[in-house]
Amino acid sequence: MKRFLALILLAAGMAFAGATLAQDKAAPAADTPAATAPAAAAAPAEAPKPAEAKPAPTPNKGDVAWMLTSTALVLMMSVPALALFYGGMVRSKNALSMLMQVFVVFSLVTVLWCIYGYSLAFTEGNAYFGGFDRLFLKGTFDSAKGEFSMAATFSKNTPLYELVFVAFQATFAAITCCLILGAVAERMKFSAVIAFIVLWFTFAYAPVAHMVWFWMGPDAYTSAKVVDEMNGKAGLLWQWGALDFAGGTVVHINAGIAGLVGAYLAGKRIGYGKEALMPHNLTLTMIGAALLWTGWFGFNAGSALEANGIAGLAFMNTYLATACAVLSWILGEALFKGKPSMLGAASGAVAGLVAITPAAGNVGIPGAFVIGTAAGLVCLWGVNGLKKLLRVDDSLDVFGVHAIGGILGALLTGVFNDPSLGGPGFPSNWFEMKPGFESITAQVLTQAKAVGVTVLWSGVVAFVAFKLVDLVIGLRVPEEAEREGLDVTSHGEAAYRM
Amino acid sequence: MKLVTAIIKPFKLDEVREALSAIGVQGITVTEVKGFGRQKGHTELYRGAEYVVDFLPKVKIEAAVKTEMLEPAIEAIEKAANTGKIGDGKIFVFDLERVIRIRTGETDAAAL
């Protein structure tokens, strides 16, 4: 444990040194952007020389404002929302450890993202991994010229400051890693959690994000001739034409599968199936679920990367599908179990949010109705019938809700993207940018292939990473510590003082 | 002197306190407790998992009274806490050897 901590400190020290070096170089010219911005705006008006090239497009301020807001909303989804949602569901002796794991993993992944994660996921490389061009976010801000680099959106001539995109995507990487923690709650060593997340983030999150979301952007498609070449530079699943608006594969299936593998390898909690392992505070869980719903507007509508109609569509779908899932989950409970429960309503909300994530801006309102309603019922089965079949102690049902909901959403996205079912279709040729849609069968097949790749990739990486951590550190706390609770034994604090 | 301990339904606490005050009992101590008796527990369902909750929440009250106050006190509690349904609770009576009021040092009857 000591050696492990020393390693972390060393890595952090090096990172800090690198960052300060870059800062030092940047310092002298730090005030130039303010000076150049008005000049650039004035230039076209006073110099109408015909030979002069068109000025490069600048980001729309509305888009920037919306994306910064969305980023903050997604941060709120992890801390506090996910931490509270999970924290309420564990026993009171482990409540603080749950909050702590989410808080620290969120911070850890944010740091890793800015060191190498963003570069691995969102720079040009091969179909699986990006490159190392953006280590320490190098090149996102040119301090000498006072210029910010640009990232692509989904419209031509509509760039976004790359740093805004980096921040937005950082919150996605961080919350995905936090999601896994629910599956292995109440029994894992804190150091094992940290070590696993470093491995899984590097070898599962970054490549899957690259495979699904990396492409050259609409402005790279300058003529019909370069379409194939530019397509070839994108990530594997993007090339296949898989649709994932806000992270059904990258976030939910990815995390859900890792959670399932973790729950198997870590083993059942002491007393599972014999003692009452009940949620200690469903009020916290309800607050967490409600904040997740709110924050998810940043997650889904923000994934449009612009403040436009598609963002509005994603917003409405996120809103509606969640409400449908709350109703269908508690209806299912009332019919099959006798009583509608608060935990069911909160779980239904999350199931609906998960399922609508890949679909958000990719389906119309009919899609939201169907996907939301189906998610409530299917995930209810995921945490009941399916969980019993799997014989696994997935403490907070990360697999049953996130993987199952994610797979359902990913497949149904292929159905309801169809313009004849109210969906927007998608541009199959980014030079002409005309929306098209081949057929439901073909698109669902593509979606299924993308799901398969994600399941396999995340599963294998999670298995190797958990095994490795088990060998070096050990996954579980000693039995005595587990009985006493992780709050006191891992952190020397208690969530509640009586 | 006697110590009267009663286990009652939580929502009957106010009525019992009023009944005891009315007959001149000077103070009681109240504790939230859990236990089981003839009244069965209930099941709680969290997602797929069903748990039987055997221990039900009750309130325990303790009152120290002079011996001549014992019968009226028992009667007051019995009347106030009764709903006629299973789970109304029980009253236990103990002999009380000594009582000391900490502030003044008064003892026994004077301290009650």
Image (tube, coloured by chain):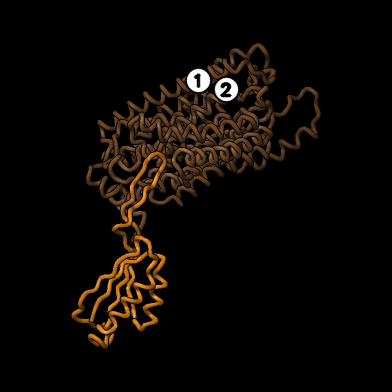
Chain colours: A brown, B orange
Identify which amino acid the numbered label 2 is placed on.
Gly
Residue A197 in view (yes/no): yes
Label 1 element class: helix
Label 2 element class: helix
Split into 4 quadrants, where in the image is the N terminus of chain A? top left
Could you tell me residue A476's position as x and y percent? 27, 38
Q: Does the CB distance between marks 2 and 1 fall below 8 Å?
A: yes
Subunit of mark 1?
A
Outermost residue to the left = B97
Task: Residue A300: name its quadrant.
Answer: top right
A407, above or below B70, in the image: above
Number of residue marks = 2
> Taking A183 as reference, is A368 left or right?
right
B52, above or below A4, in the image: below
A206, above or below B57, in the image: above
Residue for point 48% across, 42% down: A334
Could you tell me residue A448's position as x and y percent? 50, 20
Q: Which residue is mark 2?
A: A414
Report the front residue among B70 and A84: B70
Identify which amino acid the numbered label 1 is placed on.
Ala
Q: Which residue is mark 1?
A: A448
Split into 4 quadrants, where in the image is the C terminus of chain A? bottom left
Task: Residue A294: name its quadrant.
Answer: top right
Could you tell me residue A467's position as x and y percent? 29, 28
Residue for point 33% across, 43% down: A186
Subunit of mark 2?
A
Residue for point 45% across, 40% down: A20
Label 2 or label 1, whichever comes before in sequence order? 2
How far is mark 2 from mark 1, CA to CA?
9 Å
